[in-house]
Image (spheres, rainbow, N blue to C red):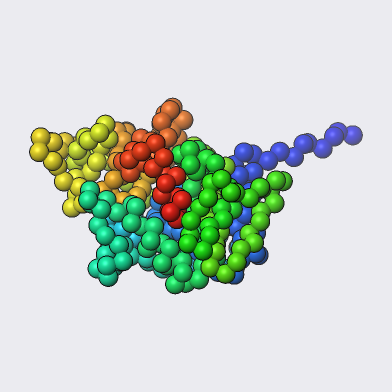
Amino acid sequence: MTAPAAYQVSHLDALEAESIFVMREVVAEMERPVLLFSGGKDSIVMLRLAQKAFAPANIPFPVMHVDTGHNFPEVLDYRDQRVAELGLQLIVASVPEALNKGMVREAADGTRNRIQTPVLLDAVEKHRFDALFGGARRDEEKARAKERVFSFRDEFGQWDPKNQRPELWSLYNGRHHPGESIRVFPLSNWTELDVWHYIARERIPLPSIYYAHEREVIERDGMLYAVNEFFRARAGEQPVKAQVRYRTVGDASCTAAVRSDADTVEKVIEEVAATRITERGATRGDDRVSEAAMEDRKREGYF
């Protein structure tokens, strides 16, 4: 009699199961969760996980996009198409609208990443959300590396990195008072490479800017920024056409592209496997303001 073959779970299956467990835990514990959905690859993967977590039922919470007004058209088109396909409720928290109302002020450099925070917090209060799913991963940046899967935020939406709850044996404490909330990161233990392997396995379509294409760019501070209505050449800067792709998607005025010939999922996986610079380190100008730029924003209530 032969012994039964050992049951093995792949690395991706284990990550998927953990993320699905986290999502189900939130829906069981919380009253008004929402998923932050920008049309970026991490939030797209979260949507696929939510589909699997609650199938055959519909996803039991809305999605929300904090819209800076500085968007890549390809990403907005994808966002609207995906929301329509899944029959989801989309809530848009608009930074341009907040600027018109005088809620926030335009930054001197024209980027709007930092002023997303008060707009996000206002939407959380307005809709009384008590849990927000975010696509942050620990491999992205050092502030995100030390944040818990369930990240408690006080009544002002602020995070205290020195006062975090233990998460032993995958036990998550979502207890909070009215007005407080929990940021939840189902992809915390994933890497950029894991995300791309999952996209390949699940055959998930993405906005076209994640793959190599020709675009007019300006090199500034060692990064390649697309020329568009939100980003103009300064004196002495000369736009050039280059073959590029985007590793991460954010505010078009401070998100850079990378030179790349990777025009398929398989080629992107090869490229990511060989890189030694994180996606935010390589492409996000807003993270270069200071050594603690991300942590400072997260303390104030940022994603």
Q: Position of residue 184 (x, y in %)?
A: 55, 55
Quadrant of the rendered image containing residue 244: top left
Query: Residue shown at 64%/43% (left/top)?
Result: 14
Query: Residue shown at 82%/37% (left/top)?
Result: 4
Q: Position of residue 204 (x, y in %)?
A: 46, 50
Q: In this figure, what is the number of numbered marks?
A: 0
Judge left or right: residue 185 versus residue 7. Answer: left
Location of residue 268 with respect to 95 vertically, above or below: above
Q: Position of residue 269 (x, y in %)?
A: 45, 35
Q: Position of residue 126 (x, y in %)?
A: 44, 72
Residue 188 seen anywhere in this rendered image of the structure: no
Query: Residue shown at 61%/44% (left/top)?
Result: 15
Quadrant of the rendered image containing residue 254: top left
Of the pair 19 and 98, the residue shown nearer to us: 98
Judge left or right: residue 280 versus residue 135. Answer: left
Query: Residue shown at 27%/51% (left/top)?
Result: 111
Location of residue 31 with respect to 49 vertically, above or below: below
Of the pair 178 and 66, the residue shown nearer to us: 178
Judge left or right: residue 216 versus residue 262. Answer: left
Location of residue 108 with respect to 243 vertically, above or below: below
- Residue most extreme to the left: 235
Of the pair 190 and 116, the residue shown nearer to us: 116
Quadrant for the N terminus, please: top right
Residue 6 seen anywhere in this rendered image of the structure: yes
